[in-house]
Image (cartoon, rainbow, N blue to C red):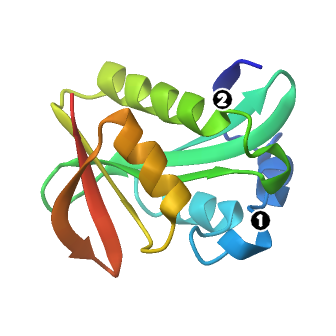
């Protein structure tokens, strides 16, 4: 099914907050409610819900680093009940397109927890490259646009 990204609003926040990764992945990504709360303190952080038809299946958040003005995909998750359907690649594609259309940038960064091999494979297959940097314990990748 085709994925669509929609703004996180008061109307869908409850459903988005209930999305959860598999138990074995809980150390890899913050809960969506926490991410939405964080975005209220950083004016450039944008939260987007991923929908398959009318059903929310995932979440992503991107924003600009205040220190160096780089653009980051800060969070991305697929609900455990919806993994393995190709939604991760679709969300990543849509997020990168959204960033390209919204920001004048020639690169996008993201980071992930070591051991999250599924995310690593997805990011590398998409064209993200290891920068050799580790920030706050996470491996930093970059995509040249």
Describe residue 105's horizontal placement relative to residue 59 as left or right.
Answer: left
The numbered dot on residue 6 is 2
Side of 58 where 121 appears, left or right: left
**Whole-Å distance between the Cαs marked 2 and 1?**
23 Å
Task: Please tell me which of labels 2 and 1 falls first in the chain.
Answer: 2
- Left or right: residue 2 compared with residue 47: right
Q: Position of residue 144 (x, y in %)?
A: 18, 34
- Looking at the image, which residue is at 67% across and 60% down? 32
Q: Report which residue position mark 1 lands on.
A: 22
Residue in the picture at 61% in, 58% down: 36
- Please tell me whether residue 129 is drawn above or below residue 29 in the rendered image: above
Q: Is mark 2 on a helix, strand or loop?
A: strand
Q: Is mark 1 on a helix, strand or loop?
A: loop
The C terminus sits in image quarter: top left
Residue drawn at x 39%, y 38% as measured from the top left: 125
- In depth, the one of 43 and 89 nearer the eye is 89
Q: Where is residue 49 in the image (x, y as percent from the top left)?
A: 67, 39
Name the residue nearer the viewer: 81 or 54.
81
Neighbour tally class for label 2: few under 14, some 14-19, many 20 plus, Cα within 10 Å: some
> At which x and y percent is residue 11?
83, 40
Q: Quadrant of the N terminus?
A: top right
Q: In which quarter of the image is residue 7?
A: top right
Which tag is nearer the camera, tag 2 or tag 1? 1
């Amino acid at each position: 099914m085709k994925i669509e990204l929609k703004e996180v609003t008061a109307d869908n926040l409850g459903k988005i907050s209930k999305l959860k990764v598999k138990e074995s992945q809980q150390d890899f990504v913050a809960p969506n409610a926490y991410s939405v709360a964080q975005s209220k303190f950083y004016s450039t952080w944008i939260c987007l819900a991923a929908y398959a038809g009318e059903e929310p299946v995932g979440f992503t958040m991107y924003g600009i680093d205040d220190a160096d003005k780089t653009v980051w995909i800060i969070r991305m998750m697929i609900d455990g009940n919806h993994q393995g359907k190709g939604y991760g690649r679709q969300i990543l594609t849509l997020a990168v397109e959204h960033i390209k259309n919204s920001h004048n940038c020639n690169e996008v960064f993201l980071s992930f927890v070591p051991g999250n091999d599924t995310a690593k494979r997805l990011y590398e297959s998409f064209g993200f490259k290891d920068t050799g940097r580790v920030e706050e314990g996470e491996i930093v990748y970059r995509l040249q646009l």
